[in-house]
Image (cartoon, rainbow, N blue to C red):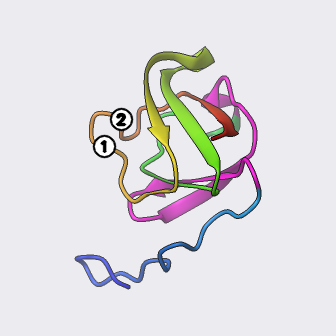
Amino acid sequence: MVDDNGNQLPPPGVGPTNPNEVWVYFDSQFRGRQGSLSQDVPNLKNISWDDCISSIRVSPGTVAEFYEHPNFGGRSFRAQGDVLSVPSEFNDKFSSVRIYRA
């Protein structure tokens, strides 16, 4: 599978399998730097992921609620499954995340 620019993409459905696991990516379409989260993070700046997440993969049965401010403040975006590209109003704007079972 390739994107509009001919870049190879990970196959669909390939993602985290452990409960409460969330993979975040620096770029859309699951590209760029990748990180793994498995618990709530009140301030993504502390783990160098503040304001830089553009795509997300969430393990089955898990929900990740991303917030625009530290300590779970401001507007939020709920992610389940694969999010190929975070909506533009949230792209590179997450500062905290809660992870829980669906």
2 and 1 marks in contact (CB < 8 Å): yes
Q: Where is residue 29 in the image (x, y as percent from the top left)?
A: 40, 65
Give amino acid for label 2: Phe
Residue 85 position by quadrant? bottom left
Tell me the crowding category of disc 2: few under 14, some 14 to 19, or many 20 or more residues within 10 angstroms, Cα based.
some
Residue under pointer 1: 87
Q: Is 38 or 80 nearer to us in this picture?
A: 80
Residue 42 is labelled as none
Q: Which residue is painted at 64% across and 51% down in the image?
A: 61
Residue 89 magenta: no
Which structural element holds mark 2?
loop
Q: Position of residue 96 (x, y in %)?
A: 58, 27
Residue under pointer 2: 90
Answer above or below: position of 22 versus 45: below
Answer above or below: position of 29 versus 89: below
Q: What stretch is highlighted in magenta?
A: 19-46
Give amino acid for label 1: Pro
Q: Position of residue 67 (x, y in %)?
A: 50, 26
Which structural element holds mark 1?
loop
Tell me the crowding category of disc 1: few under 14, some 14 to 19, or many 20 or more residues within 10 angstroms, Cα based.
few
Q: Which residue is painted at 52% across and 56% down in the image?
A: 81
Q: Which residue is painted at 47% across and 36% down in the image?
A: 78
Q: Where is residue 5 in the image (x, y as percent from the top left)?
A: 25, 78
